[in-house]
Amino acid sequence: MDSKQALNLLRKSGIEPALPFLIFSEKNGVEYANERMVELLRPIDNKLDTQDDLERVWPFFNEFQSPLALFKEITSAKFREDEDKLIYGEAFLKTFKIHVRRSEEYRIIACEMVRSGDLLADEEARQVLFRSISHEIRTATMTLRGYTEMLEDKCAEVARLEIEGLKNSLRRLDGVVRRLDDFKAELKVELEEVKQKPANKKKAV
């Protein structure tokens, strides 16, 4: 598929062509990827032709799905041709809206980065960001705690002060995760309260 065919397909689908996008088919894999998408995915040896190529470099994940699970959902899910499936994901410490639209026998995948200002206004993007930050810190903390216990078993006397310093730092990180979780819950409650408040009506003069 050449660039002209790709842009025509994109216009018909209603997806903004300025976004990083690729066109995928279950039969042939990657039919087309624009320069912005290639730059975003950073394919190995600049090879982005087959489904396996795309799967190897797919970076997007969220709290509930690993990159592989999210990729499988996007490439295998069945939905109507006029349905725009929107999935939030994290990659490169940034939040993205991943648009998936089926057009004819093709599937268009476009990635829209959520800007800082949009994060303040977009409830779902904020929730994804907080969940992902909590998840990443929690995962790193668990890994470090495992290594700390291994060090403690092997050289508790030699590196006692160093190990105690690591434990203190891990406790602080646990506190950060708890605070993020609390803030996420508080924010959700506040948003629900705002939604339930009736709109102020102007008094009749």
Image: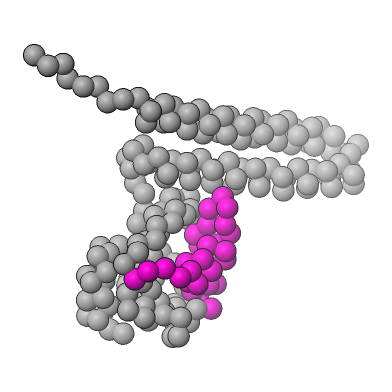
Residue shown at 64% from the left, 35% from the top: 173
14 vs 198, nearest the viewer? 198
Residue 18 seen from this side: no
Q: How many badges with numbers are in the image? A: 0
Residue 127 in the image: x percent, y percent?
A: 47, 41
Residue 72 in the image: x percent, y percent?
A: 53, 69
Q: In the image, is 169 to the left or to the right of 97?
A: right
**Does the magenta segment cover residue 58?**
yes
Residue shown at 35% from the left, 64% from the top: 83
Residue 115 in the image: x percent, y percent?
A: 34, 46
Residue shown at 66% from the left, 47% from the top: 139
Magenta residue span = 52-81
Residue with the most extreme front position: 204
Residue 99 seen from this side: yes
- Image quadrant assignment for residue 169: top right
The C terminus lies in quadrant: top left
Residue 7, above or below 94: below
- Image quadrant assignment for residue 178: top right
Residue 50 in the image: x percent, y percent?
A: 48, 82
Q: In the image, is 41 to the left or to the right of 157?
A: left
